[in-house]
Image (cartoon, rainbow, N blue to C red):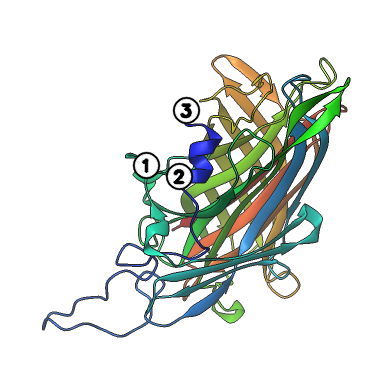
Amino acid sequence: MRTILILLGTSALAACSGGGPTTVGGNAVQTPGGGTTTTHTFVNPTDPKTYQAIGASSSYSYSTDPVAQVQYGQLYAGNANTVRDTGLQITYNPRDGIFDMKIADAKSNTNIDTRFQDPAHRTAFGGALEPQPGAPDLTSKGVIYFENGTASGVFNTTGYSGMAQTFFYQKPGTTTKYVTYAGYMRNELNQGEFTLNGGTVLRSNYTRKRAAFVYGERTSNNAVPKTGTGTFTGQMLASMVYNPLLDVDPSAPTYYQWIDGTSTTTVDFAANSFTLALAGSVHAPNFDLNTSQTFAMPVGATFNAAGGGRIDLVNAGGFVGQLTSAYFLNGANRTDLTIAGSSIDGSFFGPAAEEVGGGFRVVGGTPDQRIDILGVFTGAR
């Protein structure tokens, strides 16, 4: 595993991004006569466009020091937005290959306004430069990565400050044509000395932010079918904090982990109802300095959740509901979550509701545990 020094050092670029035929703005469609069409589509856009995204964001701030070997001063916050109150925005300009991303969510302590423009911001797994530690490798699923950041001072000494942020999304047309899913992670580290027992200790202060969201060409309300049924299958991506150990060991650290997998959304248009089933696999934690690196949910454990709700185009702009069950499987061991709160918020995408996309959240309800899963899903008929 690369150290966070490498993470920040290889990302010290101004906040901009690369473009090219593998971005959302890919190549124009070739016509039989050898020319190109100019019709704008989500897979092959020709015009700049801003998308209001649906999804969730969270943040986790804390400090560590080499003496205590624990996280302290923790502050965690998360929020899943609704279809009409997103706080998430993506703008893509196919002329310059520029992505602008904004997240304004006071409930998750997240306020991000960044641009990925420099061609060197495009990155991939393998080689000397690749996405920062903690980014999930979803290359096999057509996911594209961008990264920028800054750093000053000398790592692991007083006065060091660094930030790296990664934006990644599934290339439209891979599994869906009118909606896609994306993820975002930002790791900040500031180091300085503080006095302890007459001596000085190097303290590391962390602020970590995560987001997952879907965006695309939404279906107008009058184009959503009023009769019939449909089954939509697609992808799922979630960010998770999972720490059930605090009542056993209050010093047990909390780490972020990604979950990725599949989703199945079944819709009854006549009954204005839907069901959602999620299945995914847990990725490795994003560790920090000077903690035990103890974590409870093993890499490769599977996540499963199910729920449903109603279609409410007038009041909600899509469909809304709750997840009613969620559990993990680690081999033969099953861990059912006690759910204190949950949500599903989604919309239809495409000219005639050919696809779906939305966000979800599961908040753990067992006392003295920090469990929160915030994610998104897509699907095509």
Q: Quadrant of residue 274?
A: bottom right
Q: Residues within 10 Å of mark 1 (few under 14, many from 20)?
A: some
Q: Which residue is mark 3?
A: 1
Does dot 2 land on a helix, a strand or a loop?
loop
Q: CA distance from mark 2 to mark 3?
A: 12 Å
Q: Amino acid at mark 1?
A: Phe
Does dot 3 land on a helix, a strand or a loop?
loop
Q: Please name whichever residue, 257 or 307, is drawn nearer the observer in this view of the structure.
A: 257
Residue at the location (48% across, 66% down)? 16
Residue at the location (61% across, 47% down)? 162
Q: CA distance from mark 1 to mark 3?
A: 13 Å
Q: Residues within 10 Å of mark 3 (few under 14, many from 20)?
A: few
Outermost residue to the front: 198
Upstream in sequence: badge 1 or badge 3: 3
Q: Amino acid at mark 2?
A: Pro
Instruction: List x then y, in percent, for residue 314.
Output: 72, 75
**64 on left or right of 35:** right
Instruction: List x then y, in percent, for residue 95.
Output: 37, 79
Does dot 1 land on a helix, a strand or a loop?
loop
Q: Which residue is mark 2?
A: 131
Q: Determine whether 284 is above or below 37 in the image.
A: above
Q: Are marks 2 and 1 in contact (CB under 8 Å)?
A: yes
Q: Quadrant of residue 97?
A: bottom left
The C terminus lies in quadrant: bottom left
Q: Please name whichever residue, 25 or 308, is drawn nearer the observer in this view of the structure.
A: 25
Instruction: List x then y, in percent, for residue 70.
Output: 76, 23
Q: CA distance from mark 2 to mark 1?
A: 6 Å
Q: Amino acid at mark 3?
A: Met
Q: Which residue is mark 1?
A: 125
Q: Determine whether 178 is above or below 39 in the image.
A: above
Q: Please name whichever residue, 202 or 115, is drawn nearer the observer in this view of the structure.
A: 202
The answer to whether residue 183 is seen in the rendering is no
